[in-house]
Amino acid sequence: MTSSSKAPDADALKLYSFQLFSKLEGAVTAGMVHLGDQLGLYVALKEADQSLTSHELAERTGLNERWVREWAHNQAAARLITIDAEHRFGLTAEAAAVLATPDHPAYGVGSFHHLPQTMQALGHVRESFRTGIGHDYDSHGPEGAVGVERGFEPWNNANLLPVVLPALDGVVERLGAGATVVDVGSGAGSAVLLMAAAFPKSTFFGYDISQFALDRAAQKLRDSGLRNASFVDPRVAPMPTDHSVDLVTTFDCIHDMTQPQQMMNAIRAAIKPDGVWLLVDIKALDTFEENVRKNPMASLMYGISVLSCMSSALSEPGGEGLGTLGLSENRAREMAQVAGFARFRRLDIDHGINAFYEVRP
């Protein structure tokens, strides 16, 4: 007799039910975080610099008090905002940084921007379970591109120039003198434009297949006035194959690709014999057991993979489908060696989600 055919233990049943509904609570509260961001409620709490009643918060945001009060009760019950004995709501300094300060490296609410689009994927991935074919990032619409941008930009803005690039041997000096740089999976263009502004003697090319991301990157490029950057769809203008690129960067995208090994091969064909590839991807370990034991967000990562990362990686027949936690350090090293890279070094950079590697021919 299997354990599932036994009569359930009453206490264990209660605990299991609690465990299940705690997941539903998290999902619903995530929706409330999205609303708090979109409606400006967190920013209003931060700018007040004091606790507010629901009436005061509603007045500051031009919203209906009853709705604001219920939202605030959810957030206070979830311990995301504070509540005092007079039912005044506020933000701790830490909450203000994470929820209402876009230029802080710990800013995290941007990742909730495209939550509705991510959850809408539940509708179309049901068919993916039958066909095996997923959906690319443009299936999330233009808000998907904005959400990815808002999720990754704060940390990159604070750390790419002063921390990440200097960790690569000789790269800052090379960029200062004038280099050719390719960013694969450039998204909305934040990293390209940040580097292009800092290194005017170098030339930067961003490659992406998301039309929504390319459109946003083009607009940001026009707004910046920079002349040493451009954004390209590789299906229209492929990456160079003549070993002419000094630096290639890939930020959180290799695991999303249908053919990651082919992409690594293409990067090797593009890069100079003395060039550098900065590979940034999700921290992952070799087995499910290791990921669960060492990553408290493993269940989130596997779920996002179904709705987004693995879906993208299987969006074409024959896709490799690495998924969110599919590119461990060992696997990345092995794939880089297959592509013809000889040197692979993990960089000592502290990041909650990503691992950073310097890869050279």
Image (spheres, helix red, strand yellow):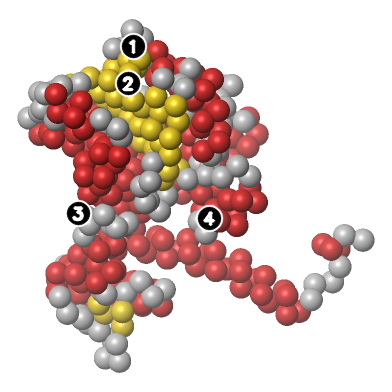
Q: Which of pointers 3 and 4 indicates the residue nearer the eye?
A: 4
- State the CA–CA distance, disc 3 to disc 4: 26 Å
- State the CA–CA distance, disc 1 to disc 3: 37 Å
Which residue is label 4 attached to?
Answer: 295
The amino acid marked with disc number 1 is His
Question: Which label's residue is closer to the chain start, 4 or 2?
Answer: 2
Q: Which of pointers 2 and 3 indicates the residue nearer the eye?
A: 2
The residue shown at (15%, 75%) is: 49
- State the CA–CA distance, disc 4 to disc 2: 33 Å
Q: Which of pointers 1 and 3 indicates the residue nearer the eye?
A: 1
Query: Camera-side residue: 65 or 235?
Result: 235
Residue 237 rendering spot, x and y as whole percentages: 30, 12
Q: State the mark number for residue 243.
A: 1
Q: State the mark number for residue 324.
A: none
- State the CA–CA distance, disc 1 to disc 4: 38 Å
The residue shown at (42%, 65%) is: 29
- State the CA–CA distance, disc 1 to disc 2: 9 Å
Residue 191 rendering spot, x and y as whole percentages: 24, 36
Residue 249 rendering spot, x and y as whole percentages: 33, 29
Mark 1 crowdedness (10 Å alpha carbons): few <14, some 14-19, many ≥20? some
Which residue is label 2 attached to?
Answer: 275
Q: Is residue 55 above or below residue 301?
A: below
The amino acid marked with disc number 4 is Asn
Question: Which label's residue is closer to the chain start, 1 or 3?
Answer: 3
Circle 1/circle 2 CB separation < 8 Å: yes
Q: Which of pointers 4 and 2 indicates the residue nearer the eye?
A: 2
Question: Which label's residue is closer to the chain start, 1 or 2?
Answer: 1
The amino acid marked with disc number 2 is Gly
